[in-house]
Amino acid sequence: MQIEAIQEHQTVTEPDLSKLKVMVVDDEAMICETLKIFFHSMGISDIKTVECGEMALSEIERTRYDYIFMDLMMPGISGIDTLIQIKKIHQYTNVIIMTGYPSMDTVINAMRNGAADFLIKPFRLQDIKIILERIHRFQVLMEKNWLLHQELEGKKEVEKLNLELGKMIGHQSRMYDIVDSLSRISKSEDLYNFIVNKSIDACNAGKACFMIYEHGEPELMVLSQHGLMDVGPGTRIVLNAKSNGRLFLDGRFLETHFGSSYEEGLSLSCNGTGSNCGIIAVPFHIRNEPFGVLIVGGKNSGCTFNDEDKFILMFIAERTALNIENIALYNNLTHSLMASLTSLVSAIEAKDPYTQQHSSRVTEYSIKIASKMGCSHDDISRLESSGPLHDIGKIGIHDSILNKPGLLTPEEFEEIKNHPLIGVNIVAPLGFDPQEQAIIRNHHERWDGKGYPDGLSGSNIPRLSRILSVADSFDAMNSNRAYRKSLPFSVCIGELQKNSGTQFDPEIVEAAVSIFSSDPEISRQVLCVPSYKAIT
């Protein structure tokens, strides 16, 4: 399902492509041959194909090409390095980068080094034609502008061309801004809010709503909106089926929130955009499958939406769809990785029945303390991800030491002290940020500087590590261990208070005591303790 196109068409003179010189640089012979046949079908006869960057540079030293379509990943010199050399030799050659491994950093780097555009493999041949015509028309416009200035003829035409050129430059700047902004977004909720806010800003509108299809359900679900009353994330909008097989967005929703007088609602079909004087709607696709719909309305100053608005919204849809898919894939991989690591921790704890579920309880306590202290959502998320793994380094410690019922020898304790470093070495290559790694590395540091492995003291110890340290120590005292029974709840609280200012951050102890003392699920655990045996 997509939103049916309602577009205004303008008659545009087709550019003359017959005199163009084109080169294709790709180590895949099939791509070179396919593009060569396609360019011939467009009327371009002067076409050169080469298989690597070195050959391309050798060729352009002999002759200048108008367009070079070049793969990013090739044997020998890379596409980016070849691009840089091409621009040094022929500054005005238009280089279009082709890649099957797109990333925002790569795209931005290519454009900053002079790429005119980029194509993501696999691409449609129609995309190449659109790029050629767009860049060619832009160049023709530049040449006309220059000639008119040189000849001092047609002042009004010059002003008109300058206006068009300014609009095109504005479009290009906005596109670069969108690509650059997307490169810094890593969370899906931030991306959905970006889609809505950037659409409003780009179109000078007052309202926008981004919704996704509920697979198997006759509804759209709102993920982000701006300017709509009584509509928030999770709101579901009904789709009405019609006799011709199409689905229509509820017209009452459109009229209530966007002031659009649709009698039957907005038709959802296979492709395109829909618009009228007060609303514009753009479909989102992932791998050619319908994913969602962006609706923008409330154009300021009583204006109507135009082709420029349609263009920038379609650009936002095309670029963000790739980010949506990448973030979803990343989240799936992250969840799978965390599940594997958590299973590993559970396996470690299973070796000692006294410590089973220790990591999950410590994480739960840490999150409660962090919430009590007003920590940010990001910090709480870091505790959620690293808390369950804070003892993962114990996989490198011998079982005889971990489960020893008596006191440890100095040598055994030195080995135990290695587990934070082992743990951080395990998670460091897996994308954990520095603060998440610090939770694992520094949860045995002490406020007085006598902890390990780095001997940090006071506020030099990362705050999240200090929080987890208190939670870790409390659960260690409040649960059975190989060398003793759990301590009474009152003794656990007393130990936290006793060591406040030496082992623990006093502010965190205060918050923890308040939470543990007021939580019946925690304080009631004293009833399950059969006896008390002090630590010796």
Image (cartoon, helix red, strand yellow):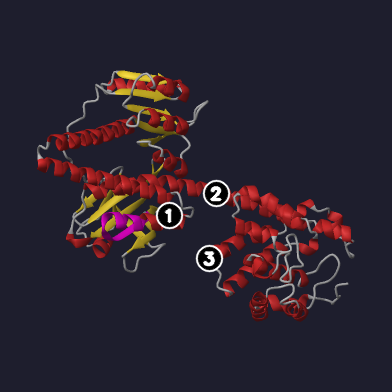
Q: Nearer the viewer, mark 2 or mark 1?
A: 1
Q: Is residue 149 left or right of residue 426?
A: left
**Residue 256, horizontal then vertical, whole percent:** 25, 65
Check the image and report above or below for 336 versus 44: below
Q: CA distance from mark 1 to mark 3?
A: 17 Å
Q: Secondary structure at mark 2?
A: helix
Residue with the mark numbered 2: 332
Q: Are marks 2 and 1 in contact (CB under 8 Å)?
A: no
Q: Nearer the viewer, residue 511 or 136?
A: 136
At a point 58% along the width and 50% down the height, the residue shown is: 334
Label 1 CA crowd tier, 10 Å (few <14, some 14–19, many 20+): many
x, y (%) of residue 50? 43, 20
Q: Which residue is mark 1?
A: 191
**Mark toward the start of the polypeptide (2 vs 1):** 1
Tell me if residue 47 can be seen: yes
Quadrant where the C terminus sits is bottom right
At a point 68% along the width and 57% down the height, the residue shown is: 389
**Residue 517 lies in quadrant:** bottom right
Residue 13 within the segment the image draws in magenta:
no
How busy is the neighbourhood of tag 3: few (under 14 within 10 Å), some, or many (20 plus)? few
Q: Which residue is mark 3?
A: 377
Is 385 situated above or below 133?
Answer: below
Q: Which region shows up in magenta?
A: 196-211
**Label 2 crowd (10 A; few <14 / some 14-19 / many >=20):** few
Percent coordinates x, y for residue 323 in the rendering: 44, 47
Q: CA distance from mark 2 to mark 1?
A: 17 Å
Q: CA distance from mark 3 to mark 2?
A: 21 Å
Determine if the magenta segment contains residue 203.
yes
Helix, strand or loop at disc 1? helix
